[in-house]
Image: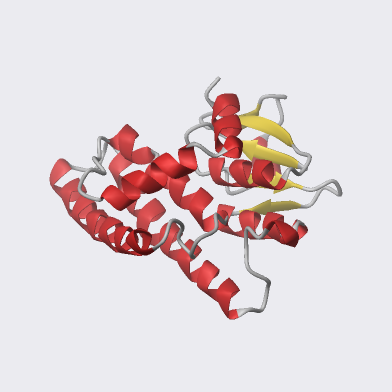
Amino acid sequence: MKLYYVPQTCSLSPHIVLRELGLPFELVRVDNQRKVTEHGEDFLKINPKGYVAALQLEDGRVLTEGTAIVQFLADLKPEAGLAPLNGSWERSRLQEVLNFISGEVHGGMGPLFNSAIPDEVKTIFREKLYKRFALLSRTLEQHDYLLGEHFGVADAYLFTVLRWTALLGLDLEPWPALQRFMARIDQRPAVIAALAVELA
C-alpha cells in the first residue's frame, strides 16, 4: 500500500493508524502547491480531488477521505481493536464521532488558515470551534479516549486536527482534558514514529 501525505495535514491520521496496526506501507510525499509527488507523478491523476490523504492499494485502487481510510485500515486487522466491528452499534458510534471531528473540528479550522478571511469573521469561527472543544472535553473528562478506555482511529484523527491549534495560535488551556489527551497520544510509539518521519 502507498499512503500519499503532506506534513502537518490530516494525512497524519491514517499514517498513525498504519503504524499502530503494523501494516506494510510506503509513504509518498506530495507537493501540495504543485500537486506532484516526490517521484514526479501528477497527484491529480492519483486523486482528482487534489488533496491528501490518499491510499493506493496493491491492485491500483485508490481510497480517499481520511475517515474512510482509517476504517478500511482498521478492518484489515480487526484483532487490533482500533475500530468496532462493521454493522455494530459501536461502529455507528465511531462513524458519528469521525463525522463530528471531520465536519465540526477539521472543517471548523479550515477558514482560520485562510488569510483572505477578515479577523472579525474568523472570530465567529473560533467561537463555534471553542464550543466543539468544550463538548469533546466533556467526553474526555469521563474516559481517556473518545469511545472509552481504548485508543482507536477516532483518537488518531482528533489528535491530528488538534495539533493545528499550535499553528493557529489557539490555546487549549481552557480544556485540560484536551491537553491531557494530546499529551497521552503524543507518547504513543506509532505517533512518535510517524511524526519523526513527517517532520524530518
- Please tell me which residue lies in front, 198 or 63: 198
Whether residue 84 is visible here, answered yes or no, is yes
Give the percent coordinates (x, y) of residue 150.
54, 58
Task: Give me the residue at 23% from left, 54% from top.
Answer: 130
User: Exactly how many numbered labels are in the figure?
Assistant: 0
- 85 vs 149: above or below: below
- Residue 188: image quadrant is top right
Quick one: which residue is furthest to the top in this view? 200
Give the percent coordinates (x, y) of residue 114.
31, 40
- Please tell me which residue lies in front, 110 or 138: 138
Task: Give me the residue at 31% from left, 52% from top.
Answer: 177
Which quadrant is home to the C terminus?
Answer: top right
Whether residue 31 is visible here, answered yes or no, is no
- 89 vs 13: above or below: below
Task: Give me the residue at 44% from left, 51% from top.
Answer: 158
- Please tell me which residue lies in front, 130 or 184: 184
- Residue 192: image quadrant is top right
Task: Give me the residue at 32% from left, 34% from top.
Answer: 166
Which quadrant is home to the N terminus?
Answer: top right
Give the percent coordinates (x, y) of residue 44.
64, 41
Q: Is residue 43 left or right of residue 200?
A: right
